[in-house]
Amino acid sequence: MNGKISKKRLEKLIEVDLEISRILNNLKEPFADRCSLILKKLDKVIPYKQSGIFLLDEDTDEISAIATRNYDKETAELIYSTGKGFIGRAVETGETLYAPDLHKKWDKSKVKPIFLDRGVTYEKANSSLVIPIKTRGKPVGVLEVISEKKDAFSNIDIEVMKIATYQIAPWIEIMKLIKNRHLEFGKDTYTYLESQHPYLKGHAKRVTKRSCEIAEVIGLNKIFIKKLNLAGQWHDIGKVKIRDDTLDSEEAFTPEENPVKAHSEKGYHLMLEYGANPAQDRILLNVIRLHHEHYDGSGYPLGLKGENIPLEARIVFIADVADALTSKRPYRKARGEPEKYTLKESVEIMKKMEPQFDSRLLDVYFKEVYPKLLDKKV
């Protein structure tokens, strides 16, 4: 570990430290974007190839990236477990972990970076450093940097990165408080929506129940289902940003001109404003933004297709359509349609819409969820 540093570089590191403080205090930027800017700034003075800021979800013990730089998509989206790999071990122990030579022969008794466990090798990656981010003495995340050089990080580099974690830490605490605020906001918003638009009463609850039933049948884990439960309840939260007279309009809008379609993007950005974390709240944000994407690419807002649509959004789309068809909607009269469809009629309509759905999930709905609805006559 090289501790020598020139006066010029020391001045540059101090400048970066001040810049990190400025970035974090720019409240106009979402926290995730501020973390990305910090990684970009560190890249100017510290010799790394890849970097990431990872946060611990204390409810699930999962660790995921809130920001990365130069990681491939698969690695950036990995979910880590406490105690496993460099990242998980740093969160578990609160210790800084430094591997000056990633290509050495690893002692089986010692922890090693998770990507080596996965059999992934980076030809130009030779050293790795993971520094825990702590609040009140407890690790809540890490800053990771990987360099193409062996023994790349000097004592000064490590101290500067530690200072960066000290600056990031209190903002994580602030984001937790904001997250609690967005939980309360979500509950209040849905209470308001249902009070103002009676046809929406119970819709989110039913969509959530059916979504979770589909998830259970296909074997998704309890953590996923817990997050899907919240996402289903809030999938239409963007409708609070749509005019009341538009939501209650009996006009038969064409798909192209329908102003209600904006609710998915509005809901997504609303949750970011209220502190949703793109990494830890990924399922929530995906459902709010993408639950009207169609498997054949004909949906909105992004026109995603097939497996490019997150699984959680594909599940909620089926449950959402199924419930909407059997619920009253003000615009149906203008279309010459019944106020609401029966369960059996809804199935026939959904079969005609089949290209829009993930056929595997639709089959689960027809075989496992729909029969229960018939029995209960919901």
Image: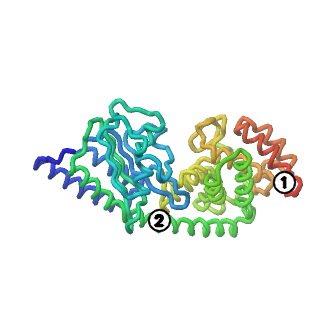
Q: Is residue 59 left or right of residue 355?
A: left
Q: Residue furthest left?
A: 7
* 10 Å crowding of disc 1: few (<14), some (14-19), many (20+): few
Q: Position of residue 377 (x, y in %)?
A: 88, 57
Q: Which is nearer the eye, 23 or 61? A: 61
Q: Is residue 278 visible?
A: no
Nearer to us of marks 2 and 1 is: 2
Location of the C terminus by quadrant is bottom right
Q: Secondary structure at mark 2?
A: helix
> Mark 2 or 1 closer to N-term?
2
The residue depicted at 79 percent of the width and 56 percent of the height is 327
Residue position marked by numbered label 2 in the rendering: 176
| Three-letter amino acid code of the residue under disc 1 | Leu
The residue depicted at 42 percent of the width and 44 percent of the height is 109
Total marks in image: 2
Q: Position of residue 354 (x, y in %)?
A: 75, 37
Separation (CA) of disc 2 from disc 1:
38 Å
* 10 Å crowding of disc 2: few (<14), some (14-19), many (20+): some
| Three-letter amino acid code of the residue under disc 2 | Lys
Residue position marked by numbered label 1 in the rendering: 373
Q: Which is nearer the eye, 373 or 28? A: 373
Q: Which is nearer the eye, 98 or 200? A: 98
Q: Position of residue 300 (x, y in %)?
A: 61, 43
